[in-house]
Amino acid sequence: MRRLGRSVHGGWERAGAHTLVRQGRDVELMHRATGFATLALVTLAPLLIVVAAADPLGRGGFASWLADGMGLSGRSARLLTDIISPSRKVIGTTSALGGVALAVFGVAFGGSVQNGYERIWGLPSGPWHRVWRQAVWMIAMTAYLYQEVQTRSVVSGPERIALSSASGVLFFWWGQRFLLGGQVRWRDLLPGALATMLGLGGLRMFSYFVFTPLIVTNAISYGAMGVVLVVESWLIGVGYVVYGGALLGRWALEHHGHRSRTG
C-alpha cells in the first residue's frame, strides 16, 4: 500500500496536478462560480428574457433557452416553462430606463467574466474605457445562445452535437481573446476553449440525469422556489466550467505545451 501510495503521489507531482489545485485556490474558483451564478440570475436573466420576448420567430422564449441549455425534457421542461414564461407584453412594459438598466447589468456580468479571465492568466485589470468590449461580448453571447436554441429545430442527433460543439469552441475561444484585449495568443487560448466545451457537455449530461428529476421533486416540495434553486445550482456549475475550463487550458499549456503565453 505504501508503494502504491508513493506511486500515486509521484504521478500526481509529475503531472503537475498539485499546481492546478493551487491555481484553482488562488483564483477562488468556487467563489467566482457562485458569483457567476448570482450575477447570471439577477442581471443576465432579465436581459435575456427581454431579448427572447422580442424573438421574431417566437420559439418558446427564455424558458425554452434555459430548458435547452440544461438538457431538460418532458415534465421538468414543462414545469420550468410554467414558472419562467413571460409573454411578449414584457417588451411593451419595459421602459427606456429599464432597458438601459438591463444593458448596464448585462455589461456588469461581462465585466465579471473578464475579471475572472484576467486573474486566471495573471493579467492586470483592463482600464475602464474598455467597457465596450464587455458590451460586445454580451451581444455575441446572446447571439450564441439564440442560435443554440434555433438550431435544435433544424438539425438533431450527431449533426447538432457537432454544430453546437464547433460554435461553442469558437465562442469561448474568441471570447477569451476579446475580453483579454488580445494579450494572450490565439493558440494558447484554444485548449481552454476545448476544455470549456467538454465540461459543458459533461454538465449537460449530469443535468439530464440529475436535475431533470430534481426539478420535479423540488417543484412538488417547495414550489417555484425549488425550481429556481435547481436553476441556480446549474448556473454555479456553468460558472465553474467556464472559469475552470480556462484555468485547465492555461495549466495544460504550462505543463504540457508551450510556456510562452503573450504575443
Image: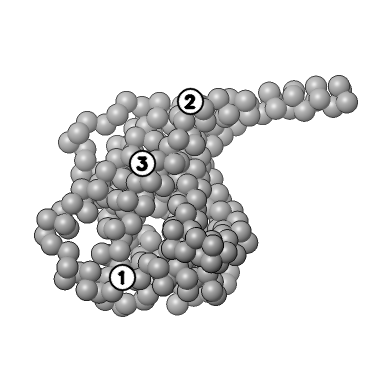
Kind of element beneath mark 2: helix
Residue wearing tag 1: 86
- Above or below, comparing residue 130 to residue 262 in the picture: below
Mark 3 neighbour density, 10 Å: few (under 14) some (14–19) many (20 or more): many
Q: Are marks 2 and 3 in contact (CB under 8 Å)?
A: no
- Above or below, comparing residue 220 to residue 262 in the picture: below
Q: Earlier in the sequence, mark 3 or mark 1?
A: 1
Q: How much space separates mark 2 and mark 3, taking CA atoms? A: 16 Å
Please indicate, yes or no, whether residue 205 appears anywhere in the rendered image.
Answer: no
Residue 12 placement (x, y as % from top left): 70, 27
The residue at 61%/59% (across/down) is 210
- Above or below, comparing residue 122 to residue 93 in the picture: above
Q: Amino acid at mark 3?
A: Val
In this rendering, would 94 be left or right of 11?
Answer: left
Mark 2 neighbour density, 10 Å: few (under 14) some (14–19) many (20 or more): few
Residue wearing tag 3: 113
Asked where in the image residue 75 lies, by quadrant, the reply is bottom right
Q: Are marks 3 and 1 in contact (CB under 8 Å)?
A: no
Q: How many marks?
A: 3
Q: In front here: 2 or 153?
A: 2
Kind of element beneath mark 1: loop
Kind of element beneath mark 3: helix
Q: Earlier in the sequence, mark 2 or mark 1?
A: 2
Please indicate, yes or no, whether residue 40 appears anywhere in the rendered image.
Answer: yes
Q: Amino acid at mark 1?
A: Pro
Q: How much space separates mark 2 and mark 1, taking CA atoms? A: 40 Å
Residue wearing tag 2: 26
